[in-house]
Every structure is written in structure tokens, then in C-alpha cells.
Image (cartoon, coloured by chain):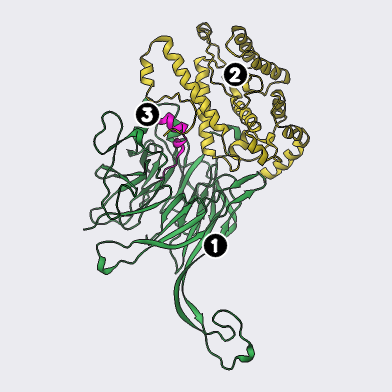
Chain colours: A green, B yellow
Amino acid sequence: ADIISTVEFNHSGELLATGDKGGRVVIFQQEQENKSQSHSRGEYNVYSTFQSHEPEFDYLKSLEIEEKINKIRWLPQKNAAQFLLSTNDKTIKLWKISERDKRPEGYNLKEEDGRYRDPTTVTTLRVPVFRPMDLMVEASPRRIFANAHTYHINSISINSDYETYLSADDLRINLWHLEITDRSFNIVDIKPANMEELTEVITAAEFHPNSCNTFVYSSSKGTIRLCDMRASALCDRHSKLFEEPEDPSNRSFFSEIISSISDVKFSHSGRYMMTRDYLSVKIWDLNMENRPVETYQVHEYLRSKLCSLYENDCIFDKFECCWNGSDRQVGFMDIVMTGSYNNFFRMFDRNTKRDITLEASRENNKPRTVLKPRKVCASGKRKKDEISVDSLDFNKKILHTAWHPKENIIAVATTNNLYIFQDKTN
Amino acid sequence: MFVRGLKRKCFDGEEDIEGTLTGIKAIPSYNLQRQSLLDMSLVKLQLCHMLVEPNLCRSVLIANTVRQIQEEMTQDGTWQMINTQSTGQASLDRLVSTDILCRSSKEQAEGKHVSGYSTFNKDFEGDQTQDSSETMSTASSVQAPRNLQSNVWEMENSQENKGNFQKSLDQIFETLENKSPNSVEDLFSEVDNSYYDLDTMLTGMMSNTKMGHCDGLDTFSSPAPTTSNSNCKSDLNELDHIVEILVES
């Protein structure tokens, strides 16, 4: 039950939230930078843990509803408290995480331990005062958005207006207002009249980072549709359709499955979007629909193994992808990151076109050492330090990664563990 | 790396080799691989966890793969006879046989188009269904007369076959639901499995069911759970009505 199912930094990067299969959310907080150790940024320590979702039973269908957290999205901070949305397959919850470091002392009618005093023993009156106490972090559910999804929710995305958000399941996308829990608007519905005609499902959706009327959703057939909510109330007709024509030389029975998009993420500027399908990461320019501007192969050596991966179901693994942080520093970087098997994860530098494979594992990397680049040998002679495709462990998959919004710190989730890496500073 | 106990006949890296083989040798091998992939896909569609709703995306992708194979088989003129009742009632849990019954080269030349899944198609009239089950339960290996008989039967229904492939999948799901392992039966003894059609299978939702499903069940006698059969006809309309209301709301 501690299989990590989602990882997300908040907008400042100070907090890092993870959700797991058991419905729990664990939030880590970055320590304030230590003046004496100016060469390393703060470490992340557990800040709060709470049970977000519980397993439920749908009596109508006689099926369980898993408590696994599919996605967490942070709201931008508006006051002292932090807010995040977490969702399982059916229900989205808005959680408030607040700190309490003072408590009132000196009540007249109560003892310090809470017992009531006999009023006849009260001879003087005093004003209660706040005294410092050990920091307590409390999480409380403030809104519960339920009963709007027949199918399994795969995405939530907060709009740039910070008032509304969308939730997407396999066939529908709904628009919510953060304050209103008993209503949501359906903005996309691809359910066919006859379910037997169903051939395509929604796999991910996201709002544009700047235009509050624009969102995209990806499908299991490898297409991305951009919709404008100003066009009509029901955005069943897309404004743009992004699809790359199939390469006939690579055609196989698995072509459709590996073209299914598992994640879509806008760039911070909103000019580009990135999609992840089974074997590659593609960068699309929103102005060009007929093909991506860049394609990066994540693990092309798996193309000849697709049948085996279909057999063991790995071909259905949904990998996520992420952009590097938005703040542009000197020596501006433009890097995208995604996970692979054998606890490998990959980064692609869009400027230099170089890529690197790293491994998240305790056995092979001591803490505070620089990660050694890895290489997979596709065929033929295996060089020293290379790993052959057949010895990859397909149970060790990195599906979820996140990049700190401002610094070069990344969070990488293996099945049960969370790794936090930072680039070496001088 | 490879988890399941399924026989692996994969395309991995073998297609190039096969391409160099000449003539008849290459074709059955590809067919073998394709059939194996088909079997695997159907098994995957069967094996969904009944405690939790199956993953719709995965189901749709597998179903599309099955459809794709079927379409290719139809275009090829390769005709597959799926042997389900070869040993009587014994192996009902294994609806799909890996035996390949290739048509003779003469028949291939004639280019008859038949659906590889027509034997599962239970949307026919009752008598045709009876014919099909009889057909399936007699011979256990390739016999020319049997081929011919089934060919004729399929030719009559080729139009329906093509259009009804989805329904075939439908029937597969629904039948397989009823043949699901005993543990599931125990857990959900009060749940009427016969209501599950493709929709339910893929989405976990009950939707309108058809009387045809129950008819089809009857032709596959034996281990069909008696509870579902008896409940089916009597409560069908009532539950249907209720579910319709709930679904539409």
C-alpha cells in the first residue's frame, strides 16, 4: 500500500506531496537553507501525513472503489495555509494544510489538561494568552467533489484563473468551481451512444498555463485535442487536433497501444506541450498540428520486445513526464524528464540535444555522490558497465517524476521509495 | 521479465527471419504468431479483476488489437475455426483454442471472406445457434466436411459477422463472465452475472441487456451458474428498467 502513485511540488517548491496506493498523502518540506552549509540546498523532511481517501464500495455495481491517489495538484498559496486537490478514481478533495505553533493557555473555567474547574473555586479572572507550542501540521478536508464521474478519473488541472479546475475520466471532462461541490459542468463527452462502439478513451487533460479558456486532452489513439471553452459549452469539437502520421515502416499490431498518450504537460510559457507515449517523448508547438517539433526516444530498445511487454502488461504502463523549472537562470536550461524501467529515468536537453540515463536505487548510488550515467545495450556486444535489455527489471518502473519549480532539484518515485536529487553545486 | 505461463509465440525479432522464408512456410508462422497474439488478447480481456472495475483504457486497447487482428484475418481470407467444445464440457473455461485450422490453399484461392469469430456469434436465431453449438461440439480437428458445413453457415451470416464482431466480443465477455472462477462466484453469489455485457465488462456499469444473452447461455449448457440462469429471465426486465433509469440520470 505504499506504492507511490503521484508526486508533485507546490508552486514555491518548498513542499513536495506524494500520494500512494493506500490513499495516503505525505508532504515533505524543504529545510530552510543553512547558512553554514551554503553549498547545499535544504533537505526534504516529512511535514505532514494524512489519509486522503478511503476505500469505498459501490453497491450498485458491486465493485470496490480504490483509494489510490491518482493525482495531486497544489493551489497557489494565498494565505498562511496551503491547499491541494487530491483525487482517486471517483472523488476529488480539497485539503487545507495549516500550521499551528501556538495554543491558548490560561482559561478560567478549564484546567490545562481540559478538565472543567469547579466554578466555585474561581476567585480571580485572567485573560487567556497564546503561548508557543511544538509545531503541529493539520490537514483538513475543506471540499469534497463527488459523484460526477462514472469512469476513472485520470487527471485534474487547476485553471490559471485559480477559481476553477477540470477533472477528466476515461470518457468525460468536467469543469468545477473550487467553492462549489454540488455542481460541475461537463465540457467534453466522448462516450458513444452505443458503448460497443467505443474505441478511444481520454488519457490525460490539462489547462493552458496562461489562457483560462484553453485546455488540451490526449487520447489512447495518440491524438491531442485543444479546446476553447469560449467556442461552446460542450467542447466536443476541438479547435486543434495534434496527431503525427504513423510511420508505416514501424507498423505492428502494437502500434496503437504504444501510441497511446500517457501524459500531457504544457511548457511554462504555454507555447509548447509535451506528450509521453510508450516509447517516446514528443514536444509539440501549439501552432503546428501535423507533427511534433521534437521527438526523444526514451527506450527504443524495447520496440523489438513489444510482444513480451504486451504479455506481461508492461505495455500499458503509464509514464509521466515533466519540464524543468520555470525560472530562467543564467545558462538557461530547457530539459525534459521522464521515467523508464529498471529504476532508470531519462533527461533530454532540448538545446544541446544530449540525453542522459540515471538510476534511482540505493544499492548503486550512495547518498551525496554524483549519479553515474547508465547505458542500456540494445544488442550485440555489451560493453563494460552497460546493461543488456534482457536483464532489465520491468517491475522496477519509474512512472512519476517531478521537477522543483525554481531550482534544479528533482523528485523521482520508484515503486516504494521517493528519491530527491539535486545538481551538484560549486 | 516474463510473468505469465502463457506459451510465448511472439513477434519479437522474428519477423525479419520469417520474411526470408519462402512460400507456405512463412505464412503459417505469421498466422501462428497472430493467432497466439489473439489468444493472449482474449485471455487478457477475460482476466479482469472483478473486485475493482477494470481499467477501461487497457480494455479498449486490447479490444482494438483483437479487432485489428480479426480484420486482417478477414482480409487475408485466413479462416480460423475456434474449437470450444472439443472435449465436451471439460474445458469450458478455456474458450479459445490455440489450434489453428488453416484453410486449404484451394479455399484460400477462392478468397472466401469469413469472420474468424463467427462461431462466437450468438445473435442468430435460436436454430442457427443450435447449429453452431452442434458444429462446435462434434469434430475436434480439421475435417473437410466440417469446414464446409461451417463455411456454408458462415457464408450465410458473413454480413452479420462483419458487423457483429463487436457483438462477438460482447458475447465472449458475457460468456466468460459466467465461466469466471469459482472464487468470484462465491464472492458475488447474489450478483447476477448474466447482466454483464461488453459495456459492463469494460466499464463496470450495468446497461441494457438483451434476451439474446440468456439464449446464448442456454446453448452452452453445463457449468453456467444456475443462479444466474434462473434469475436472468425472471428479473431481467425489472432490473433492466431500474438500471435504465439509473444510467440515464
Residue A264 in the image: state x and y as whole percent.
42, 45
Q: Which mark is residue A141?
A: 1
Q: Is residue A374 above or below residue B37?
A: below
Among numbered discs 1 and 3, the one appearing first in the sequence: 1
Residue B59 in the image: state x and y as whole percent.
54, 35
The C terminus of chain A, quarter of image: bottom left
Amino acid type indicated by mark 3 = Ser
Residue A340 appears in the picture as rendered: yes
Where, by quadrant of the figure, is residue A123 drawn?
Answer: bottom right
Q: Which mark is residue B83?
A: 2
Output the chain of dot 2: B
> Which type of secondary structure does the marked residue at label 1 adopt?
strand
Numbered disc total: 3
Q: Which residues are magenta?
A: A304-320
Residue A220 in the image: state x and y as whole percent.
48, 37
Q: Is residue B160 above or below residue A296?
A: above
Q: Label 2 vs label 3: CA separation?
A: 31 Å
Crowding at mark 1 (Cα within 10 Å: few <14, some 14-19, many 20+) = some
Viewer-proximal residue among B41 and A2 = A2
Identify the residue at the far right of this view: B234
Viewer-proximal residue among B156 and B65 = B65
Q: Label 1 vs label 2: CA separation?
A: 56 Å
Q: Which mark is residue A304?
A: 3
Please report the residue visible at 46 percent of the width from the left and 58 percent of the height from the top.
Answer: A26
Q: Looking at the image, do the residues carrying marks 1 and 2 touch, with CB atoms under 8 Å apart?
A: no
Viewer-proximal residue among A56 and A206 = A56
